[in-house]
Amino acid sequence: MTGDNLPANPSVLNTTVLSNFAYIDQLWVVVGISRICTVPVVREELERGVDSHPYLQSAVDTLGDDVPVATVSETVANREAVVSDHLDPGEAQAFALADAHDGRLLTDDGDARSFAKEQGVTVVGSVGVLLATIDAGKISQETADEWLSAWIDEVGYYVPYRNIADYR
């Protein structure tokens, strides 16, 4: 996927959202997000993490056909270089792509979320994806609560509320 065939207003995944949904073996949710893609650095981060977190292999396996990996243009690379002082590599590249193509950044990283919002880029995290999936009628609130609890109790995911209803 190059800049020429990148969807308009892409939804650009960072590692955190992919990791969360891989952990609960529910990557179909992420795959179903409109205009979804990720960036090469995120693929590299996931591949490096497989040895210590084997569940990440399923996320790696979705990349390509199910979740396209965008080719980074010179414009995106230049923006990435500018923001790399503020963000980790995967976050910087995902942010730069979302920013350059009027997209949204999908991440749970607090610093990346704050930075993106300051720059006027829309941010959605794993909880936002859960809420959208409920609203689309694809899962129940109870299922979302179970998944959120697994992230909190088993992965150490930090969010202000344990119940999805509290985010409404």
Image (cartoon, grey):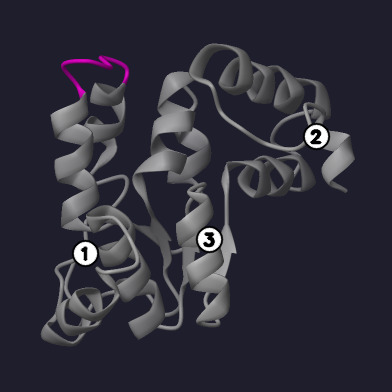
Q: Secondary structure at mark 2?
A: helix
> Counting residues from the N terminus, which is met first, the one under dot 3 or under dot 2?
3
Residue bearing the label numbered 3: 113
> Counting residues from the N terminus, which is met first, the one under dot 1 or under dot 3?
1
Q: Which mark is residue 70?
A: 1
Q: Was residue 52 drawn as part of the magenta stretch in this picture?
A: yes
Q: Which region is colored magenta? A: 50-55
Frontmost of labels 1 and 2 is 2
Q: CA distance from mark 3 to mark 2?
A: 19 Å
Residue found at x 50% / y 81%: 119
Three-letter amino acid code at the position of disc 1? Ala
Q: CA distance from mark 1 to mark 3?
A: 21 Å
Q: Is residue 80 left or right of residue 129?
A: left
Magenta: main secondary structure: loop
Residue found at x 46% / y 75%: 103
Residue bearing the label numbered 2: 164
User: In the current view of this chain or complex, which residue is farthest to the bottom?
Assistant: 75
> In the rendering, at what x and y percent does residue 45 appear?
20, 40
